[in-house]
């Protein structure tokens, strides 16, 4: 009668989506930081 | 403010109109012209007028009326004022039992039997702790 | 950067708060708080709260299905307010908040739809039914999917922001409709389980639910801080790109 597997599936969907999203946010932030640093460097040296 | 500026407003206005249209259609289809399900009394009042049309009806399973044979399941559904006999041959949800509210899709025949193609259980509006299990039990 | 005065920059480089050290510290603190709250909420939902008498263990989906729906509604309300703010002030800060909140709202609406479907199968006996609450929830999902697509495919950032703001205001109409669907129409969903008169559930269930609601709200705040920071970093990158393009053009003109 008890459908424990449905509970586990729903919990897994919730936790995995949140973790994947947080990971995606981390990746995006890192990429932008890197680009920004490179651009600021380029701009700075270009104007010396 | 030339042609370009005017054109840039065209898209959001069209989008808003499209959205309003969708909203209106949904509102109409669910409230005015039809309801998601009929009560048993409403079904009985329609009587044979419904004919072979597919309808959705909701009622509580009358205790003690559930009978299972090899292929079909029969029971009586009630909304408190009207009763209807139901036959159904498909899969039943886990919580199907006496006193559970069910939503049936099927047709109401001249023989006063509702032949259901689908049987859904309606959520109860309250939760109760199971007296047979200890709090914290994760057993099946 | 003293020599930048030699070339007039068309766009100032915004040193915005969301990239400051204090902002990052706040994000870290909120992140830790969220993690602790989520852990406690999960324990209460899976272990502490009693098993439901009628539907059994699967009822525990309630403790994250409803909070996910709540975060969706909250996020779309923030989109609504920020969209009004943007149309009024036309500042990128409002727009950054609106766009970030729409994305997070869509994520939680997706979680709400999927967990609801998984809950519906064993309890109702179907993954999906076109009852008014489900139909209006799906429409909600499409509205904010449309919102994000509009942003992604708009010819310019400013145009995207403006169109999306209109959609963010108009689209919010669906939120109260979804919420009140069970009161207005006959649906498969129960009518409000928690009413001003009290909650039709065990006090331990109510505690688990409220803690989970709080934890999900903290999670929304944490995700917003991180998502808004991305938006602000993106703006700086774009400003620098414009600046670089301008600098390249100058010698050609001279």
Image (tube, helix red, strand yellow):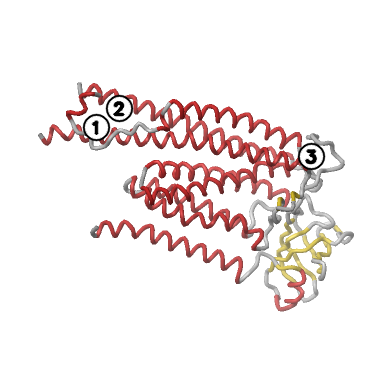
Tag 3 secondary structure: loop
Front-most of residues C51 and B75: C51
Give the x, y percent position of residue B129: 81, 43
Q: Is residue C89 above or below residue C33?
A: below
Chain of the residue displaying label 1: C
Circle 2 SS class? helix
Q: Are marks 1 and 3 on the same chain?
A: yes
* Viewer can see residue C130: no
Residue tagged 3: C50
Seen as rendered, the residue at the extreme left is C254
Q: Pick whichever of labels 1 and 3 is earlier in the sequence.
A: 3
Residue lying at the far bottom of the rendered structure: B49
Q: Position of residue B87 (x, y in %)?
A: 80, 64
Chain under numbered label 2: A
**Rendered residue at 33%/34% (across/down):** C14
Q: Residue at x 70, y 64 (%)?
A: B105
Image quadrant in which the C terminus of chain A is located: top left
Q: CA distance from mark 2 to mark 1?
A: 9 Å
Mark 3 chain: C
> Which residue does the numbered mark 2 point to in the structure image?
A39
**Contact check, label 2 and label 1, Cβ < 8 Å:** yes
- Label placed on residue C244: 1
């Amino acid at each position: 009668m008890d459908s424990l597997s449905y509970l586990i599936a729903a919990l897994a969907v919730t936790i995995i989506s949140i973790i994947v999203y947080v990971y995606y946010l981390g990746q995006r932030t890192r990429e932008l930081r890197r680009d920004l640093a490179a651009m600021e460097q380029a701009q700075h040296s270009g104007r010396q | 403010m030339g042609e370009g500026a005017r054109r840039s407003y065209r898209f959001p206005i069209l989008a808003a109109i499209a959205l309003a249209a969708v909203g209106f259609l949904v509102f109409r289809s669910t409230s005015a012209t039809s309801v998601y399900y009929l009560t048993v009394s409403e079904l009985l009042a329609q009587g044979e007028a419904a004919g072979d049309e597919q309808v959705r009806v909701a009622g509580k399973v009358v205790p003690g009326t559930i009978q299972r044979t090899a292929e079909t399941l029969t029971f009586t559904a009630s909304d408190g004022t009207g009763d209807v006999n139901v036959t159904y041959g498909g899969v039943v949800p886990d919580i199907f039992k006496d006193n559970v509210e069910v939503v049936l899709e099927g047709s109401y025949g001249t023989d006063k039997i509702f032949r259901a193609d689908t049987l859904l259980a309606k959520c109860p509006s309250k939760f109760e702790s199971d007296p047979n299990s200890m709090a914290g039990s994760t057993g099946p | 950067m003293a020599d930048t005065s030699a070339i007039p920059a068309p766009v100032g480089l915004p040193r915005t708060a969301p990239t400051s050290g204090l902002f990052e510290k706040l994000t870290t603190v909120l992140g830790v708080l969220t993690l602790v709250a989520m852990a406690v909420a999960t324990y209460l939902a899976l272990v502490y709260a009693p098993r439901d008498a009628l539907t059994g263990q699967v009822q525990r989906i309630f403790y994250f299905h409803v909070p996910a729906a709540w975060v969706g509604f909250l996020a779309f309300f923030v989109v609504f307010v920020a969209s009004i703010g943007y149309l009024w002030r036309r500042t990128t800060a409002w727009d950054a908040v609106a766009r970030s909140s729409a994305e997070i709202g869509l994520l939680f609406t997706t979680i709400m739809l999927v967990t609801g479907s998984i809950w519906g199968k064993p309890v109702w006996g179907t993954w999906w039914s076109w009852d008014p609450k489900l139909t209006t929830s799906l429409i909600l999902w499409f509205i904010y999917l449309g919102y994000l697509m509009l942003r992604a495919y708009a010819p310019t950032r400013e145009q995207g922001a403006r169109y999306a703001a209109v959609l963010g205001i108009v689209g919010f109409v669906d939120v109260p409709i979804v919420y009140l669907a069970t009161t207005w129409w006959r649906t498969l969903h129960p009518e409000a389980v928690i009413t001003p008169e009290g909650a039709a559930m065990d006090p331990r269930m109510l505690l688990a639910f409220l803690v989970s609601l709080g934890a999900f709200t903290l999670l929304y705040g944490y995700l917003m801080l991180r998502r808004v920071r991305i938006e602000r970093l993106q703006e700086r990158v774009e400003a620098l790109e414009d600046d670089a393009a301008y600098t390249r053009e100058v010698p050609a003109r001279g």
